[in-house]
Amino acid sequence: MTRATAIVNIHKEGLLLAPTLNSLRLAKTNAVAAGYDIELLVIADNADQITVNVAKQYLDVIDRIIPVEFADLGASREYGIAQAQNDWVFLHDGDDLFSSNWFTKFFEMQANGEIDPRTIYHTSLFARFGMEIDIRQMIDSWDARFHPLFLASEWYFSNKSVLNRKIFDDFPMPYNNKRIGIGNEDWTWSCHTINAGIRHSYLPETICFYRTKSAETSLGLTPGMIHDASPLFDPENILRHEIQRAGRPERIRAFADSMTAKGDPVIGDGLPPGWFWHEVTLQGTFESLISDYRAVPHGVLRCQLPNLHYNVVSATQFLMRDLDERPKIFIFATMENLCAADKIVELFLKAAHDHNNQSHQPVLVVDEGAHVFSDFGLMGRFGAKIICISHFQRFYKTEEYYHNRLLMRPLVQFKGSIILDLGSDVFAQLFQEFHRVFLENFESVTAVLFDAYQDVMSPALNNTAQNITLSKAHKGRELQVFAQPDLADTLQQNLDQNIQPWPNELTDSINATTRHRYRSITHADGFELNQLLAPPPPAPVIPLPAETFGKGVSFQVEQSGEVDFLILKHSKVKSYLYRTNDTWMPKDWYPEALKFLHNNKHIWIVPPQISVSKNQTGQYISRWNTFSAPQDIFSVWYDRCFTGETTPIAVITREPICKTPPKTAAELAKALYYYCVDPDKKVSTCGETLAIATGKSP
């Protein structure tokens, strides 16, 4: 009970790492002098040389420097926690400083029986310095003023904390993924833990001095990132939390006295206390920027509670209410730019109702403008959820930053849904900020243009053109666009984008509900939504020729796509081949590798020795791989999958490496990495063998 491990994650902090290690050295010295023991681990995730050199100057305080190549803060934190020798762990980043009593305060409270192993402890003050100067007072998640749904729009609890690592057994650390826009791992983790009843509290009179940086150098400020789905925002859990809060004995503040644009921020305890200034003096000797607190005029600097946006709670409840367990089809529409909008929407909702055996719940996000939109008919007929934007803005008064994040919450909660944009300004606004999230996390994203001809002033056309540009810049899934047949050809030439004409059935249905709506016809025939959602037909799969693997090797194809998975048989012994389809290997390698695997029972995976990758410009890069530390190699392969470099991946294994064959190169590299967590799963090459990325299917 007198031992703990402190973990510092570093990357490219450079000289900024020195103040952090000076600060932690002082905190560790104070704890050791009081009779406590702190193990200090530095996890260097793709750290540059100057950062590593700075760390090596502190081997008097650092117990181990552990290099890793995850390129992800959540993954490297998780790895550091697994390497700790103690159950209680302190988590730090490489450019922040901590009060000199940070470790000691924890041990003193633990000795007094005040530490709960199911509580996560933060510093009581979060003092930002650098590009911004302010002080935030930590709020306890069990405080009567705090509501869990605040987390829908704002971050409250940093992972710079101390906790019992057994909590990670139940709640693994989420990862960041810039490519797909899902991140803010500590934000997501707070949602998961608080939903499950884990308390977030703080150690009194402790401080984290948090260095503020530009968005370009701060992962937490990366534009377009949003925290992941969480059970906290499931409708049944929203109701459960309200019932639990109603039963608490203390006075619960349910909503703001008056709804202001910022949601009625609450002032904290006033001026910074004396112990804060004491630490400013101490830490200012390590980092001169911390001394800037003394330059702030008296009375301006205050210890504020984070903004408690009570209207955000109501807004989140409004957004998530009535969402059932069915997968979703989100339809973004604008009333003003659609003729006979009510009938058009009804057509799409009926198509959604019929799609996939009636298994999708339609969610209509509509900018209704000055119209009054009643949702009873659509709810009764289709079980639809209606989100009216003007109503949402008028009654919940969320600022733009919170507004966009709140509107994204039901979408993020139901990743994998179908997205239909009918030329909506709302969708364009969300797509501008979160296009990576849309393109990478949903079954399909389709724009349907109702314009009859090309009009340079058309909001729908301009929105779609902007969205097409963002899609191309992302280099991910192309935005699928449908237009009326006469318009499709013109747009395809002007936008350099594949614009598909409407299905004939949709054209007939639209005409029936617009041109003829006031005649005797009161309804139109429906159309099949599958025609809008079906992706382009895949390229035909060319069967592997019999001579691919040389003589004496038979094969059975189990999966063919971006990653081929085959069962190989040589001398009556089965082995398993995983290979990305743009990887070329000489056919003589296969029987040689199989024979090597058969004769070396301690080897479980045989990869090539030399890999020749192709970068984004088409240039080839040759690398010699040593598999003495296979996890490091597979981790690098995983990283390269997101840099635009095509890395050839081909391995023969003694047994399947995972239950479900990986479908992408990144999934394959990740599966190999986790398979080799077991140190007995040895990896070795058989001679100086070669794999080349062809850039196309062999």
Image (spheres, helix red, strand yellow):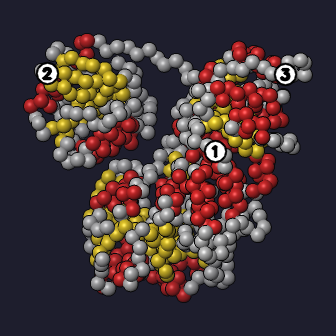
Q: Nearer the viewer, mark 1 or mark 2?
A: 1
Per the image, the residue denoted by label 2 is 572
Q: Residue at x 71, y 14 (%)?
A: 504
Count of numbered circles on the image: 3
> How many neighbours does mark 2 have within 10 angstroms: few (below 14), some (14-19), or many (20 or more)?
few
Residue at the far bottom in the pictured view? 274
- Looking at the picture, which amino acid does disc 1 mark? Leu
634 vs 230: above or below:
above
Q: Is residue 352 left or right of residue 203?
A: right
Mark sitting earlier along the chain (1/2): 1
Q: Residue at x 35, y 63 (%)?
A: 166
Q: Give the CA separation, mark 3 to mark 1.
A: 30 Å
Residue 323 circle label: 1
Helix, strand or loop at mark 1: loop
Mark sitting earlier along the chain (3/1): 1
Per the image, the residue denoted by label 3 is 522
108 vs 117: above or below:
below
> How many neighbours does mark 1 have within 10 angstroms: few (below 14), some (14-19), or many (20 or more)?
many
Helix, strand or loop at mark 3: loop
- Looking at the picture, which amino acid does disc 2 mark? Lys
Q: Quadrant of the C terminus?
A: top left
Q: Position of residue 127 (x, y in %)?
A: 54, 73
Name the residue nearer the viewer: 655 or 626: 655
Name the residue nearer the viewer: 498 or 655: 655
